[in-house]
Image (spheres, rainbow, N blue to C red):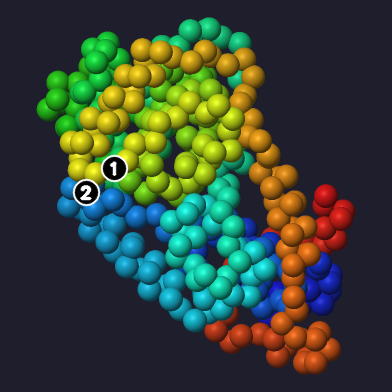
Amino acid sequence: AKVLELDREHDFDLAHHATIASYWTRCALTVLDKPVVLGPVGGGVTCPPGLLPALGLRGAVGYFFRTATRHAFGHRPSVREAWKNATIVLAQNAETADRIPDDCNVEIYSNGISSSVLLSAGETERSQDLIFAGRLLPWKGCLLAVETLAKVSNANTRLFIYGDGPEKQRIEARAAELGLSDRVIFPGRVDRSELHAHLARAGALIHPAVHEEGGLIMSEALALGTPVVCLNRGGVVVNASQVPNAHITLVDAKGPSGTVNRLAAAVDGFLEDPPPVLRTPALPEKSFGEVLLETYERAVEIFVPRQPAASLPAEEHVDSDVDDSYDSAAYGDTSSVA
């Protein structure tokens, strides 16, 4: 096996499987009888039942298929063995952590705070613009953002939708039905710097995704000091707790109309009393790199070998059900990394 061959060559002190952020995929590195960090993994966040109608028929069918597939893959013996053998499993959110058995060592930390932003000197006052950014897919909730715009008190507020995807035609049609075509703008895909420049002075980011694992754009908005309005679920809940004085409203999701009303009320609050435009980014209490280094140190400290290293040839440690073809990140002397 390639993993064991590399370990015999380099004698790693610790291995980190970081390339596949799904709790239900297999991890070859856990065949090593050494400290292994797995994650951050996601995939456990589900859509609130009351918001399933917002997905549309095709979106709902796709959602149920993905959910069933993840559930089935997550129960494979090779996957569950990987969780058990990992020294520490990092989960992006509480919902994913709940998918992993209690006898595994799971810690919750989102990789959303790994994002970086660049603030440039510009306008000092916030606009009344709302921004949605992401792929235009049913579960991203852009249709809910358009519905929210119709309920916002300020009739001059516009919604800028950055991104593209198969849901665009449906979003355009709903905006037309609501008489909002002139207030819903589609800049499409743009450079990150252009998006950040607009986001930094926007009234709010609205991102009502029904199951968001990490929420990179929401972390970027928080770093820029821009208010965030989103649903109270997934990785953004974790990210918000890491940014001091974050301007964010987490809305509990129920039925579509009630959820839209609460989203609109949160938006109104930020537009009526906007926070200042930042000159420097609002950094998390700890960087993602610092958290990883601390995790590596804990993994080395708490690691307990499964069996004496010399009791069996290395080849016999391999579980035939484990696929080691995935790319993974392995680290040597953790003292040199720190």
Q: Is residue 15 left or right of residue 275?
A: right
Q: Is residue 19 left or right of residue 45?
A: right
**Residue drawn 28% across and 50% down?**
48
- Amino acid type indicated by mark 1: Ala
Give the mark nearest the N terminus, 1 or 2. 2
Q: Residue furthest right?
A: 336
In the image, residue 239 lies at what x, y percent?
53, 40
> How many neighbours does mark 1 have within 10 angstroms: few (below 14), some (14-19), or many (20 or more)?
many
**Residue drawn 73% across and 45% down?**
290
In the image, residue 266 lies at what x, y percent?
33, 26
Q: Is residue 310 left or right of residue 101?
A: right
Q: Is residue 132 visible?
A: no
- Check disc 2 and report the residue beneath it: 50
In the image, residue 302 lies at what x, y percent?
74, 67
Q: Residue furthest top?
A: 124
State the count of labels: 2
Viewer-side residue, 312 vs 183: 312
**Residue drawn 33% across and 62% down?**
66
- Check disc 1 and report the residue beneath it: 253
- Amino acid type indicated by mark 2: Gly
Q: Is residue 282 visible?
A: yes
Is 232 placed above or below 57 here? above
